[in-house]
Amino acid sequence: MRYDLKSPILGFEHIAEVEFEKIDDLFAKISNKKEQFEIFLVNPYMLREYSFEIPNYISLLLELNAQSGVEVYCAMVLQKNREDSMVNFLAPIVFNTQNAKAGQVVLSMLDYPDFNLSAPLSLFVSKSA
């Protein structure tokens, strides 16, 4: 599904639209073929207890309401060995599935001290998974 980015992805501020593709219940990816852009994502709720407050400005940009279908994913730096891949829990990407708008939320380490900027996937997924 194609999403308009209403809040840019850090480091990729020029990307305004992405194609979202679920790989399975745990993994997904976003891409933009024109920009030769691809980021692998992981569903943080499948890995750990994960909860954060969506800031009002993101709710407004994504036009979130009680009826919105919301999905949240975290960026992952993919490594050759999947377990060595690094997950950024401090900058989730929120998708409004109802209107195809998405945006990245940058969380403060002070407000979410249990979230890591770069946590190895091996802490959450066994090699047999």
Image (spheres, rainbow, N blue to C red):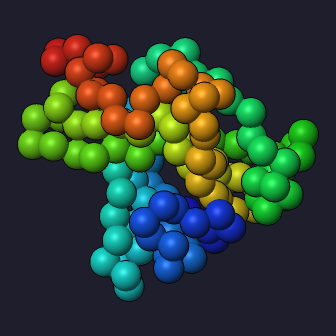
Res 60 → quadrant: bottom right
Q: Is residue 88 above or below residue 104?
A: above
- Residue 119 lies, in percent from the top left, at 33, 29
Q: Position of residue 75 (x, y in %)?
A: 41, 46
Of all residues shown, which one is farthest toward the right?
Answer: 66
Label tally: 0
Q: In this image, 79 relative to 27: left or right? A: left
Specify whether 89 is left or right of 79.
right
Q: Residue furthest left?
A: 80
Q: Give the residue at the far front of this rendering.
A: 110
- Residue 28 placement (x, y as % from top left): 41, 46
Q: Residue at x 51, y 38 (%)?
A: 90
Above or below 110: residue 66: below
Image quarter of residue 108: top right
Q: Nearer the viewer, residue 101 or 54?
A: 54
Is residue 129 visible from the viewing direction of this image? no
> Which quadrant, please, contains the N terminus?
bottom right
Question: Residue 88, can we see it?
Answer: yes
| Quarter of the figure that contains the C terminus | top left
Of residues 40 and 68, the one drawn nearer to the viewer in this rendering: 40
Q: What residue is drawn where x is 70% and y is 43%?
A: 70
Q: Residue at x 59, y 54 (%)?
A: 104
Q: Name the residue rendered at 89%, 46% in the picture.
A: 65
Give the vertical position of 22 relative to 99 (above or below): above
